[in-house]
Image (cartoon, grey):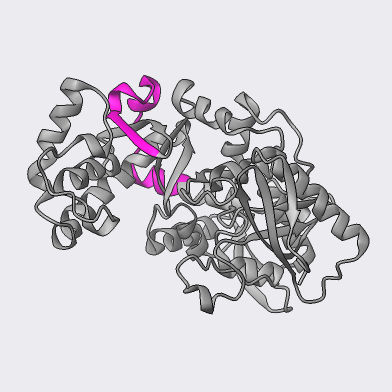
Amino acid sequence: MSVPVLHNAQARHLFLARHGLADRPSGPGKGADLKGVIDDLGFVQLDSVNTFARAHDLILWSRRQRFRPKALQHLLHRDRKVFEHWTHDAAVIPMESFAHWRLRFARDAVRMEDRWKEWRRGDFTAKIDAVLRRIADHGCCTSGQVGEGESRGSGGWWDWHPSKTALEYLWRSGQVSVVRRDGFTKVYDLTERVIPAEHLNARHHPQQTIDWCCAGALDRLGFATSGELAAFWDHVTSAEAKAWCAVALSEGRIIEVDVEGVDGKLRRSFAWPGLMDEDVGAPVPRLRILSPFDPALRDRKRAERLFGFHYRIEIFVPEAKRKYGYYVFPVIEGDRLIGRIDMKREEGVLAVRAFWPEQGVRMGAGRVQALETELERAAAFGGCERVTYAEDWIR
């Protein structure tokens, strides 16, 4: 039986539709509507860099331009509709997923007990009970409120004092949870005081969680290799995802498809049987500024295959060696990534330093106007009074 081919344009349209970038970014951007966006994405990565807006806020604003950061805080802190934990990095995750995170808790605990003793300062395991007692007896706390009398060191992630490491261990192993953030500082409490009972008390067999992870990843990616399914949540192993695909394929629950890249090369992938029949049109021709951590770009290699867009964050590249800038934002128009922009919030002004169009993208008057209009919207979202442009900002 021949394997169907998913042509590049169709693949891009399906992928962007799965990631909430095919329709206009309308909707209230709060409450149930915002929760629905996070459900559809699976999770939203948190990041502290704030040159313009924090990554999680920009991810949500790109899909709901009436969104404001307080709406996410309400879901997390007041309504308990999402919780914060780890995928590839810290993320907000639908509360319905909590029971499936127990597999992650158990695996992370073993990994940390094994590795952190070697590369963290001091014996953090000797502090675990004391930190847990401190929270149980005195209530929620930050990492700065534990470990009194311990040397603070440099404060970098590589030089935590033992009680801070113990607190992080308790969070990653599920014994404490983030109850809120003060600024960007995590505040922890006992998990049973944070997670609603129906989710706290739910349990799943590990194989059920593996099935849930692989199926949920395929739902959101549309088409994927077994490696891409494993990487989506960073939750199951490559071997587990490969085994899931083999069984699901043999049972007819999934099919093989050849996905065409922008260069015409085919990549064998898996999909649900109805994928080839989906009638997904082109995304609206809306220009949007994306976060560097946007879910559509998180897998950099996939973005290159589908869109021909090579993107790397240059935060850790010495300034003299940067090709673009410290933290530049990808720009998408319809189903095409058209460039990247260097902009920063400075004293109430959104300062645009440069825009680099992708090869073959013509910056005619209409496209420049669309970009400037989106920058005005971005400025309003970021609390800026106006936008300023460097001379010859379009490179």
**Image quadrant where one finds the N terminus:** bottom right
Q: Which residue is drawn at 68% across and 49% down?
A: 350
Tell me: 34 left or right of 6: left
**Image quadrant where one finds the C terminus:** bottom right
Q: Depth check: 16 or 238 in front?
A: 16
Residue 222 location (% of width, % of height):
64, 54
Residue 56 figure quarter: top right
Residue 283 visible at all: no
Number of numbered discs: 0
Residue 109 location (% of width, % of height):
22, 48
Residue 323 location (% of width, % of height):
60, 76
Q: Depth check: 77 or 329 in front?
A: 329
Residue 82 visible at all: yes
Q: Depth check: 185 or 267 in front?
A: 185
- Asked if residue 207 is among those painted magenta in the image, a careful observer would answer yes
- Asked if residue 278 is among those painted magenta in the image, a careful observer would answer no
- In the displayed orientation, state which residue is furthest to the right: 365
Tell me: 384 left or right of 94: right
Q: Residue at x 26, y 52 (%)?
A: 155
Tell me: 134 left or right of 46: left
Tell me: 346 left or right of 209: right
| Residue extent of the magenta highlight | 185-212
Q: Residue at x 70, y 43 (%)?
A: 379
Q: Depth check: 51 or 374 in front?
A: 51
The correct choice, above or below, for 254 with respect to 354 in the image is above
Q: Which residue is drawn at 74% across and 44% down?
A: 386
Residue 98 location (% of width, % of height):
40, 35
The correct choice, above or below, for 193 with respect to 41 in the image is above
